[in-house]
């Protein structure tokens, strides 16, 4: 494996290396693949134990024909009428509030509290009109002899019989299916009575329900709106801009000073600079926080970018090493021509050091984009939140149920860095190698 | 005069950094040290209380647990990370097609923002619907089916499966392959007589079988995992250590964080890779002439040549462990039962939650001293083993 000699390894060894690397790559990419897969699933599909490999990555959808039209549907529940107690599909002749109905369809909470008081009924906008069908089961009882539907409020409403649902004789399963729309993926709409009552529905044997895959790009706009993406992005980009500008300008200046200017105590100061890289953040965090608090800057962006304008030990070190490798005669020539140090820096050193400077910019951008603890400590109003903080706040708010939305937001949040990486791959790889040189 | 101007110019250039050194490093360093001897609720001024904070630290069981968790994490995650990263780097260094493609793939996880990593892995570690337990359950049932095939474990009558055709095939296939494919074997193997090749292949097959059996034993003996009922570990919510009778062993929650940290190992591998490529080729050529095998070359050339980077990475990882914050903050909030309360989280809690700046400063200072000691230790231990070219 570590053969660095010129001749190639035999083919079976190369194949073995390929096999191992492909396996490893699959493991490394799997979390990201799953992140994207989850972000395209309906909420219900994320909360389901997969029964096949494809289930893990693609949400299952179902289609069925209801009243002559093909719909995307969800399975609401299994319907089990008994031979002596058949179920009915009926059409009421009067309008009544949806709250008076045992909701055949809908979240569990509704089924537990079927009886609403008059005030609650008044607040409900969902009405069951003669245009809608109702499933008359063991809860909403229908008597075909009298043509009356007994609601759970005790009221009896005249209704017209549409169909009688017999238990299947061939042992197949009956499902209540309801029309599904992509917007159902939004948590806000779950449990909305309007939706539950007014959607197309029917009771169908399993054989008439077609299994399909369901991929929902609509998760993305919903997730981004919920996280406050645009506002957070603007905040994050502002911080990135300020820190990148600050880090580049200050580190170039200081690095140049350490590399080419002779002054008393340079060696000691540089040694101190390198040593400060060993001081963990936790040590300086508290006094620096108190310092910014006394300046009245907590709750503003300033603590998050001002520091970078004074340089950072790591970048100063990297740039100094890079500068020292530049051809010295160019600088000497410029000095003889009467250039000031700043002119030499600007006209000679900076143009020659573009890759190193790009690396400082890139790593600062990456650091600011990913930073979580800084914003957590210094920002306290949601309008200031960076992407990191907004995403965490969205997670904390829901305790991690809307995984499809969390994964969609996460994907969008990670994507710029991955794109940036591919766009600047050369600088990147060289930079990573450079960080290793330190050893 | 000219000299004075040069001095002024020099200090002028590094002025911003001097300010930073004083304001953001020097002052906090000294102030933190002072605060550590004070009772300091952040809204009042610090009151000197001598060594009280440090005395409290000595008897604070929560702090001891926190320190223990951090050190256990370091003791497991750092060596594991170094070994994985070097192994990966060696594979990435192989002269094969698509080399740069593989490098990119393994580096990508490092680009994912920390908060996303935390939330993504929360989902992966979800005990019910998370990817990890789904995959584990799949592997479990696959292992069951497999070993059942060979040994009859899990079959109605144990031992019945041992002579099943599949087992025979597994034993026989490498042996047959070794004889049949003789011409493509490495020269060193090819030179040996066919009988010895056959015996060697049988040995390999036996080892394979033993490995499968061991895997099965580990799976069924150690992991409380039942493929059918999915009694997989609860991961982040699971405070039980593995094995359960050793109290200092990492809990499932800590293991989860360790597993997660391995996802970012590609970044370290790229650093090692850069160093691997700097190893002079003539060293290997000389070793080839001396007839050294792959293992000898790795042990006596590759590892010594990259040892400075290993040391550097270990030291940086030690410092990094004391800063692990975002992941436990988001994923476990230190729980269950403080099993993932890393020291950085401890300091954060005492500063911002309990408003005890003085105590938090004392903790921070203890950490600093520990980092210094561990770093010196790392240098000492490695003194004889780290090879610096040209020295």
Image: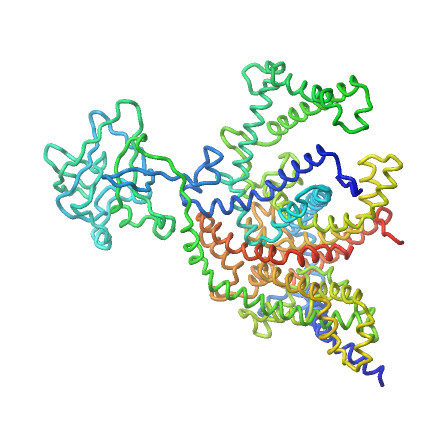
Task: Classify residue B146 by image quadrant.
Answer: top right
Vertical relation: B131 (above or below) A166: below
Position of B199 relative to A162 (above/below): above
Q: What scheme was used to colour the molecule?
A: rainbow
Q: Position of residue B334 (x, y in %)?
A: 58, 50
Measured as percent of width and height from the top left, residue A5 is found at 80, 42
Residue B267 versus residue B208 in the image, above or below: below
User: Where is the N terminus of chain A found, in terms of image quarters?
Assistant: top right
Please indicate, yes or no, whether residue B65 appears anywhere in the rendered image: no
Residue A46 drawn at (x, y percent): 44, 42
Residue B158 appears in view: yes
Q: In this rendering, would A234 be left or right of B67?
A: left
**Percent from the top left, x then y, of residue B327?**
59, 51
Left or right of residue B10, residue A427 in this image: left
The residue at the far bottom in this view is: B1
Give the position of the C terminus of chain A as an image quadrant. bottom right
Residue ID at (80%, 78%): A335
| Nearest to the observer: residue A45 or residue A340 | A340
Q: Would you place residue A279 above or below residue A143 in this image?
A: below
At 45% from the left and 61% from the top, the residue drawn is A228
Q: Nearer the viewer, residue A164 or A284?
A: A164
* Image quarter of residue A86: top left
Q: Residue at x 47, y 36 (%)?
A: A54
Q: Nearer the viewer, residue A354 or A116?
A: A354
Q: Is residue B41 left or right of residue B268?
A: left
């Amino acid at each position: 494996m570590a053969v660095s000699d010129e001749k190639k390894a035999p083919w079976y060894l190369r194949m073995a290396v390929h096999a191992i690397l492909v396996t490893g790559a699959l493991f490394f990419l799997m979390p990201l693949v799953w992140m994207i897969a989850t972000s395209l699933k309906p909420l219900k599909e994320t909360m389901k134990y997969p029964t096949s490999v494809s289930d893990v990555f693609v949400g299952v959808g179902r289609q069925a024909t209801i009243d002559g039209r093909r719909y995307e549907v969800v399975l609401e529940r299994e319907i089990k009428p008994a031979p002596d107690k058949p179920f009915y599909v009926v059409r009421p002749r009067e309008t009544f509030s949806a709250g008076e109905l045992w909701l055949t369809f809908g979240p569990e909470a509704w089924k537990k509290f079927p009886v609403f008081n008059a005030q609650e009924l008044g607040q409900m906008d969902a009405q069951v009109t003669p245009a809608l069908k109702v499933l008359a089961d063991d809860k909403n009882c229908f008597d075909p002899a009298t043509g009356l539907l007994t609601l759970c409020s005790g009221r009896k409403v005249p209704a017209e019989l549409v169909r009688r649902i017999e238990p299947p004789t061939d042992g197949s399963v009956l499902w209540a299916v309801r029309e599904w729309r992509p917007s159902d993926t939004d948590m806000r709409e779950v449990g909305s009575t309007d939706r539950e009552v007014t959607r197309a529905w029917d009771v169908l044997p399993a054989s008439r329900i077609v299994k399909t895959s369901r991929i929902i790009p609509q998760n993305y706009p919903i997730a981004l709106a919920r996280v406050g993406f645009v506002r957070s992005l603007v905040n994050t980009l502002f911080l990135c801009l300020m820190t990148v500008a600050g880090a580049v300008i200050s580190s170039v200046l200081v690095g140049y000073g350490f590399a080419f200017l002779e002054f008393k105590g340079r060696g000691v100061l540089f040694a101190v600079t390198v040593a400060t890289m060993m001081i963990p953040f936790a040590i300086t965090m508290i006094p620096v926080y108190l310092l910014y608090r006394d300046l009245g800057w907590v709750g503003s962006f300033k603590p998050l970018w001002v520091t970078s304008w004074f340089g950072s030990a790591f970048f100063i070190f990297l740039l100094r090493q890079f500068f020292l490798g530049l051809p010295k005669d160019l600088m000497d020539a410029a000095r003889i021509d009467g250039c000031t140090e700043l002119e030499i820096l600007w006209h000679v050193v900076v143009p020659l050091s573009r890759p190193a400077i790009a690396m400082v910019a890139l790593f600062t951008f990456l650091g600011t984009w990913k930073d979580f603890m800084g914003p957590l400590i210094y920002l306290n109003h949601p309008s200031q939140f960076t992407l990191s903080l907004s995403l965490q706040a969205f997670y904390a708010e829901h305790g991690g149920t809307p995984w499809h939305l969390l994964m969609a937001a996460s994907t969008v949040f990670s994507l710029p860095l991955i794109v940036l990486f591919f766009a600047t791959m050369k600088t990147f790889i060289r930079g990573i190698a450079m960080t290793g040189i330190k050893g | 005069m000219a000299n004075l101007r040069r001095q002024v110019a020099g200090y002028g250039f590094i002025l911003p950094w001097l300010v930073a050194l004083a304001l953001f490093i020097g002052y906090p360093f000294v102030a933190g040290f002072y605060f550590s001897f004070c009772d300091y609720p952040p809204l009042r001024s610090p009151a000197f209380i001598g060594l009280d904070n440090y005395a409290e630290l000595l008897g604070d069981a929560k702090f001891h647990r926190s320190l223990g968790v951090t050190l256990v994490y370091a003791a497991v995650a750092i060596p594991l990370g170094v070994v994985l990263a070097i192994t990966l780097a060696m594979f990435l260094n192989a002269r094969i097609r698509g080399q740069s493609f593989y490098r990119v793939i393994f580096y990508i996880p490092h680009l994912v923002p920390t908060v996303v990593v935390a939330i993504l892995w929360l989902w992966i570690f979800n005990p019910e619907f998370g990817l990890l337990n789904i995959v584990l359950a799949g592997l479990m049932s696959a292992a069951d089916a497999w070993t059942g095939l060979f040994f009859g474990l899990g079959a109605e009558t144990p031992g019945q499966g041992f002579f099943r055709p599949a087992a025979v095939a597994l034993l026989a296939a490498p042996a047959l392959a070794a004889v049949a494919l003789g011409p493509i074997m490495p020269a060193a193997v090819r030179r040996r007589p066919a009988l010895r090749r056959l015996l060697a292949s049988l040995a390999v097959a036996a080892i394979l079988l033993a490995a499968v059996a061991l895997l099965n034993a580990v799976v069924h003996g150690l992991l409380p995992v039942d493929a059918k009922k999915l009694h997989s570990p609860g991961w982040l919510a699971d405070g039980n250590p593995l094995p359960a009778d050793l109290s200092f062993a990492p809990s499932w929650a800590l293991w989860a964080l360790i597993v997660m940290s391995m996802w970012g190992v590609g970044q370290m591998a790229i650093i090692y890779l850069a160093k691997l490529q700097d190893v002079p080729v003539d060293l290997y050529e000389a070793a080839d002439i001396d007839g050294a095998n792959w293992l000898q070359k790795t042990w006596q050339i590759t590892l010594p040549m990259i040892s400075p980077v290993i040391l550097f990475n270990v030291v940086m990882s030690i410092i990094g462990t004391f800063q692990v914050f975002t992941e436990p903050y988001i994923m476990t909030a230190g729980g269950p039962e403080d099993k993932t309360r890393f020291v950085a989280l401890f300091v954060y809690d005492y500063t911002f939650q309990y408003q005890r700046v003085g105590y938090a400063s004392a903790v921070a200072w203890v950490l600093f001293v520990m980092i210094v000691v561990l770093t010196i230790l790392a240098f000492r231990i490695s003194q004889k083993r780290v090879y610096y070219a040209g020295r």
